[in-house]
Image (cartoon, coloured by chain):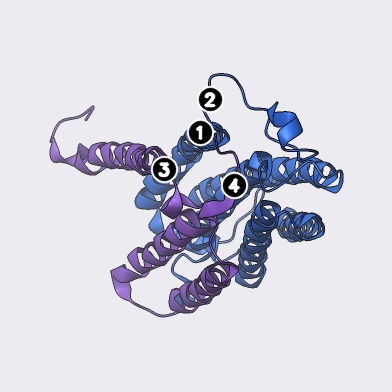
Chain colours: A purple, B blue
Amino acid sequence: MSEQSLSEHSISTTSYYLVFLALMVGTALTTWIAYLDLGWLNTPVALGIACTKAMLVVLYFMHVKHGTKLTKIVAVSGIFWLLLLLGFTMADILTRGWLGFPGK
Amino acid sequence: MSAEAHGAVFHAPRAHQFDTAEQQKDASTLGMWLFLVTEIMFFSGLFCCYLVYRWFYPEAFAAASHHLDVALGGFNTAVLICSSLTMVLAVNASQAGKRRALVAFLILTILLGGVFLGVKAVEWHHKYVDHHIPGPSFHFEGPNARQAQLFFSLYFVMTGLHALHMVIGIGLLTVLTVQARRGKFTPTYNTPVDMCGLYWHFVDLIWIFLFPLLYLIDRHTK
């Protein structure tokens, strides 16, 4: 029975520094872009950068990239429930005006 | 038996239902992730509330957001990313069996967490001085004062809940530091360091979304 090393999944520290650099650049980028007028695109771009940063943290800092399949499924399920919550809430909020009677 | 075969090396106290220490660690990781998914849902309620009210009152949210300090918020984002780096390096050091590096990185992470909370306290104090704390003394210049109060309510609850998680994280890391100094963690047993790392990165994740959503709404209009 081998209980020798649990650290075989450990990544070299170089990738950690690269991810760190990308996160810092992402923070500077999102702050800079916030002061540019992109019209309706401002918020989607800010969220896009935030999601990219979040992916880097989850995949590399939280080791999901080298994790088990079950861990990956659980992590994705978190995003799935979040989208269900936001999606169904907005489906209600955005369509309330469609019906032309009071108490809608 | 195996204890003698491995001499003085400390092993994970392996529960009998697991075949290997690796299987036991995978189970811990899975359990931690399940907990983090419930944490995502915990914060999701607030993000959902934010989405609905920002959809209803975009101008008020932009006007209120302009009263937050981007420099302090951006600085804190950088501090938190640095603390995530030191945390992941601590996990790495524990897997490599480098006890001194592990203790050093844990202490660095705690210090960076402290800096974040300190800056947060300064920001909250600014809001107190400016009468931007929701309640009877709330005061906001402009046509959308009532809706701006909603923004500040969300701001305080979201950053407050996030700060509470930071305080808990710092508590966990302090316990880890003491245990690490005593040499509890080895290349074959470092699950607590790994799990606290996951928690710490999760707290960083929440802030990655809070920063643009609270501080950076329509900054170009002013």
Same chain assignment for discs 4 and 1: no
Residue B49 at x, y = what percent?
43, 41
Image coords of residue A47 (percent x, y): 39, 61
Measured in 3D between alpha carbons, the distance from the residue under mark 4 to the one under mark 3, in whole angstroms, is: 16 Å
Q: Position of residue A59 (x, y in %)?
A: 45, 56
- What amino acid does circle 3 point to? Thr
Q: Mark 3 lies on which chain?
A: A
Q: Name the residue under label 3.
A: A68
Q: Earlier in the sequence, mark 4 or mark 3?
A: 4
Asked whether the residues under the numbered discs 2 and 1 touch, taking CB atoms below 8 Å apart as contact, a structural biologist would say yes
In the image, are marks 4 and 2 on the same chain?
no
Q: Residue A44 carries which label?
A: none
Identify the image quadrant of residue B41: top left
Q: Which chain carries label 4?
A: A
Provide the chain ID for the residue under circle 2: B
Q: Mark 2 points at which residue?
A: B18
